[in-house]
Amino acid sequence: MPFDLASRLAERRAAHLYRHRPLLETPQQPEVTVDGAPLLAFCSNDYLGLASHPDVIRAMQQGAERWGVGGGASHLVMGHSTPHHQLEEALAEFTGRPRALLFSTGYMANLAAVTALVGQGDTVLEDRINHASLLDAGLLSGARFSRYLHNDADSLAKRLDKATGNTLVVTDGVFSMDGDLADLPALCATAKAKNAWVMVDDAHGFGPLGKTGGGIVEHFGLGVDDVPVLVGTLGKAFGTAGAFVAGSEGLIETLIQFARPYIYTTSQPPAVAYATLKSLALLRSESWRRDHLNGLIARFRQGANEIGLTLMDSPTPIQPILVGSSERALKLSSALRERGILVGAIRPPTVPAGSARLRVTFSASHSEAQVERLLDILAECWNQMAKEPETDA
Ligand SMILES: *Cc1c(COP(=O)(O)O)cnc(C)c1O
């Protein structure tokens, strides 16, 4: 029978993999109402607490009054407006790159960059746990596609030896489901030795990492020669929406000429770019947000270790608790939810089978007391679950 959707859906449900969309009935902030219930949330990517910042909201309102609501056309036709242009200049200056190019989403920025740079006869090498948008981009490009072992420069080197044509090495900066950092010093040196280019998608590093929030390249002090293609997204720590690619003049002109996900789409609303100029200024200057966030992360890791939870090697606001089976991950997240805590259960295929986890994330808008509450309730639920036998692998 063609399109047997019902059995596909039933299979997914039986495997504890069925997805639901929690309905958020309040703005993005620690205390939320979800599906009618008041909850304390630890699952947004609003790491610096800028998504509901009054100055950013005001900038969005002013931007809409001044520039209207819609982008109106693609960038190449008549949709490239002054706020877009100013934001690109500010992002270039921020990242220390000659130029930056604005996109409506990170998914599109990644598709654009990879498919404009490599194609048939070329090679794209990716970390095996890269974000789905990077893996999709590599497959779509038509280049020879291969995944190296997670964060392993030796595994990368072996693949580089077999590479043909232009070779692009692609990695998350901060890995989105594990929270660990790409070993960029080693990966970049390995790539450089073989004349390959490195592309870093630092969706989760911009904001929390680096002295001024410049992300993993600021953290490691890497310039455009080390990381020729640098991607950032604006919907996470920036608190708004969109994404950018930063790099050389030649790279940005190449994307404008050849990148189909750039060319064939309407520009983002100019008011969003206008608001992002404000959130960029806050992200750079208010380093107390990073300091407070790092304090929360340190306290959580200490408390979680005392409970006996398995954390990952993460210095970032992404602090996954490894649980194992999808069923147990769901069970723990629903136990937390019954006690007023919202944390996302991340299951295959987003993460490898057997490594389902609770993805706890922190924001500068959380208080220390809220982290203590999370730890108390986690201890209660974890001890409760330890007493119950596992019924499913
Ligand atoms: C969220 C994310 C993206 C996608 O960005 P959007 O702007 O949400 O489309 C890309 N890469 C990584 C690593 C991400 O975490």
Image (spheres, rainbow, N blue to C red):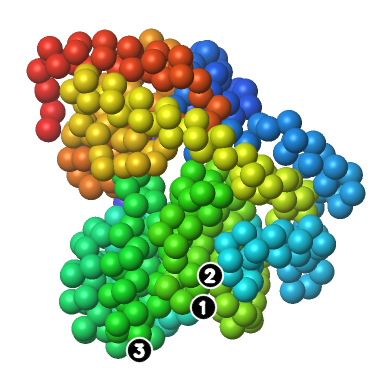
- Cβ–Cβ below 8 Å for labels 1 and 2? yes
Mark 2 lies on residue: 112
Q: As shown in the figure, which amino acid type bears the numbered disc 3?
A: Gly
Decide if residue 316 is on the left or right side of residue 355. Answer: right
Mark 1 lies on residue: 116
Query: Which comes before the other along the chain, label 3 or label 1?
Result: 1
Q: As shown in the figure, which amino acid type bears the numbered disc 1?
A: Ala
Q: Quadrant of the C terminus?
A: top left
Query: Which comes before the other along the chain, label 2 or label 3?
Result: 2
Decide if residue 173 is on the left or right side of residue 246. Answer: left
Q: Which mark is residue 165?
A: 3
Q: CA distance from mark 2 to mark 3?
A: 19 Å
Q: Position of residue 137 (x, y in %)?
A: 43, 67
Decide if residue 52 is on the left or right side of residue 384. Answer: right
Q: Position of residue 95 (x, y in %)?
A: 57, 62
Q: Nearer the viewer, residue 195 or 107?
A: 195
Q: Nearer the viewer, residue 153 or 101?
A: 153
Q: As shown in the figure, which amino acid type bears the numbered disc 2?
A: Ala
Q: Position of residue 38 (x, y in %)?
A: 52, 13
Query: Is ligand 1 within 8 Å of the beta carbon of the residue shown at mark 3?
Result: no
Determine the secondary structure under disc 1: helix
